[in-house]
Amino acid sequence: QVQLVESGGGTVQAGDAVRLSCAASGGTFSRYVMGWFRQTPGDEREFVATITWAGIWTYYADSVKGRFTIFRDDAKNTVFLQMNSLKPEDTAVYYCAASVVDGTQNREDAYDYWGQGTQVSVSS
């Protein structure tokens, strides 16, 4: 059973940067496609970014393209989300997810394992 634990959230000002981390245990991390999603109260979970095995491919939601970067360190079983130029509309709980299916995955139902989430709040 894979366990994912996010960290790095907090409250920041618009324009600031935050790096989220997601540490995995219990599986072969390098074999998973990893993704980040986010959710605000009353809304559905929204795709943010995904990265394939060995970081060969990445894919981003249009709303974060050019501002967010997903990358992974397989030696540390960790995936990161570097978030720059944050906006108030980026405020959400951010979730890390792992998929056993190859390829860039932007659908929530493509992911098999989920973390508990970390809150990011951006004030104007």
Image (cartoon, helix red, strand yellow):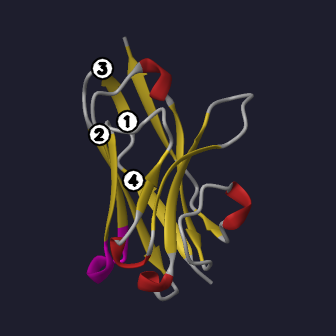
- Residue 113 placement (x, y as % from top left): 63, 70
Q: How many marks?
A: 4
Give the mark toward the camera: 4 or 3. 3
Up-down: is 14 above or below 62? above
The dot on residue 10 is 1
The dot on residue 18 is 2
For the residues labelled 4 and 1, the Cα–Cα distance comes to 9 Å
Q: Which residues are magenta?
A: 73-78
For the residues labelled 1 and 3, the Cα–Cα distance comes to 10 Å
Reply yes or no: does residue 79 show up in magenta.
Answer: no
Q: Which residue is situated farthest in the bottom direction here?
A: 28
The residue under label 1 is which amino acid type? Gly
The reply to whether discs 2 and 3 touch (Cβ–Cβ < 8 Å) is no
For the residues labelled 4 and 3, the Cα–Cα distance comes to 18 Å
- Residue ID at (44%, 19%): 88
The residue under label 4 is which amino acid type? Ser
Q: Name the residue that disc number 3 marks.
A: 13
- Circle 2 packing at 10 Å, graded few (<14), some (14-19), many (20+), is some
The reply to whether discs 2 and 1 touch (Cβ–Cβ < 8 Å) is yes
Query: Is 115 positioned to the left or the right of 69 in the image?
Result: right
For the residues labelled 2 and 4, the Cα–Cα distance comes to 11 Å
The residue under label 3 is which amino acid type? Gln
The reply to whether discs 2 and 4 touch (Cβ–Cβ < 8 Å) is no
* Of 61 and 88, the residue lying toward us: 61
- Residue 98 placement (x, y as % from top left): 56, 70
Query: Is 15 positioned to the left or the right of 117 in the image?
Result: left
The reply to whether discs 4 and 3 touch (Cβ–Cβ < 8 Å) is no
The dot on residue 7 is 4
- Circle 4 packing at 10 Å, graded few (<14), some (14-19), many (20+), is some
